[in-house]
């Protein structure tokens, strides 16, 4: 059996090392958390509502559903309406949340369903709190409790990580933070929420655009790989901080159905 030339062995060794080597982690330095937390809260308060049209891909346990025309209405982080339309403008499904109750209706059906707190799990495949979803769709996080533990660290390129701990929940928020100038600038890039050490969901915010002096991510990707869940939202048209009609967050019919189908 002929031995390989030394140059071939050397090249193979380099290739093997390249395959198993891991990229070095970006070093982070602990910094005061108050400026980042204050800027994050200012951004949250700067958002009052959203009316948008988006394309949405929802994957649940390997099954993918795509909607090219979805109306999304947000009132702060307290109310939500999602309605998917077909190619002829017909309603395929509509989900509303008025801050208390989740209502759902499929296209072609007269009655509404009241799936309760587990509504998003059987619709999207993830047990996601409605307020969490509202915040993510706006490129924000929910309001941080005053009793939460806060830690922050920053690295190269003005990228910082804010760790928020409250009981068994830990939230890690990656932001781009610039403290120069009269007002600090903070742009959320991604976040992860854990409960009892297990991932609840992670979300990425990409392709930001300034709308009414608010930087709205044009691409929002929520996912939990362990549960086979992902939700990708690509905004097309969007209006920020416009008047929102409260009746958009209610559904009514003659027949009522409790629970999931």
Image (cartoon, grey):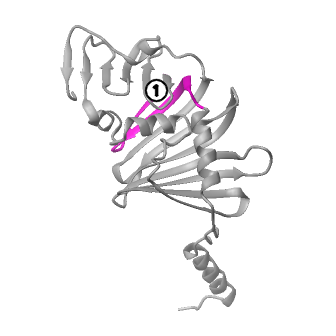
The answer to which quarter of the image holds residue 2 is bottom right
User: Based on the displayed image, in which of its 4 quarters is residue 7 positioned?
Assistant: bottom right
Query: Would residue 27 be found to the left or right of residue 227 on screen?
Result: right
Is 126 contained in the magenta span? no
Q: Residue at x 74, y 52 (%)?
A: 179
Residue under the image location 43 percent in, 20 percent down: 83
Looking at the figure, which quarter contains the C terminus?
top left
- Up/down of 14 relative to 76, above or below: below
Q: How would you classify the magenta stretch by its main secondary structure?
A: strand
Where does residue 196 sit, x and y in percent of width and height?
33, 59
Q: Secondary structure at mark 1?
A: strand
Residue 77 horizontal/vertical position (percent) = 47, 32
Instruction: Name which residue lies at 50% across and 39% down.
Output: 136
**Rendering coords of residue 133 (x, y %):** 44, 37
The magenta segment: 47-70
Which residue position is annotated with label 1? Answer: 67
């Amino acid at each position: 059996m002929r031995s390989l030339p030394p140059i071939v062995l050397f090249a193979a060794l380099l290739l093997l090392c390249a395959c198993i080597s891991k990229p070095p982690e970006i070093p982070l330095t602990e910094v005061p958390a108050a400026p980042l937390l204050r800027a994050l809260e200012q951004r949250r308060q700067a958002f009052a509502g959203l009316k948008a049209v988006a394309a949405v891909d929802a994957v649940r346990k390997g099954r993918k559903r795509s909607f090219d025309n979805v109306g999304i209405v947000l009132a702060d982080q307290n109310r939500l309406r999602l309605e998917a339309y077909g190619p002829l403008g017909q309603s395929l499904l509509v989900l509303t949340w008025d801050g208390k109750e989740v209502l759902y209706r499929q296209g072609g059906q007269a009655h509404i369903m009241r799936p309760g707190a587990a509504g998003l799990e059987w619709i999207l495949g993830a047990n996601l709190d409605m307020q969490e979803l509202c915040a993510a769709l706006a490129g924000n996080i929910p309001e941080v409790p005053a009793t939460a533990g806060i830690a922050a660290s920053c690295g190269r390129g003005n990228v910082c990580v804010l760790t928020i701990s409250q009981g068994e929940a830990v939230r890690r928020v990656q932001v781009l933070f610039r403290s120069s100038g009269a007002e600090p600038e903070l742009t959320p890039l991604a976040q992860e929420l854990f409960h009892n050490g297990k991932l609840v969901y992670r979300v990425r915010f990409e392709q930001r655009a300034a709308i009414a002096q608010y930087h709205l991510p044009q691409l929002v990707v929520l996912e939990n790989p362990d549960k086979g869940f992902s939700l990708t939202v690509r905004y097309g048209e969007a209006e920020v901080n416009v008047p929102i009609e409260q009746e958009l967050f209610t559904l009514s019919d003659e027949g009522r159905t409790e629970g999931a189908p």
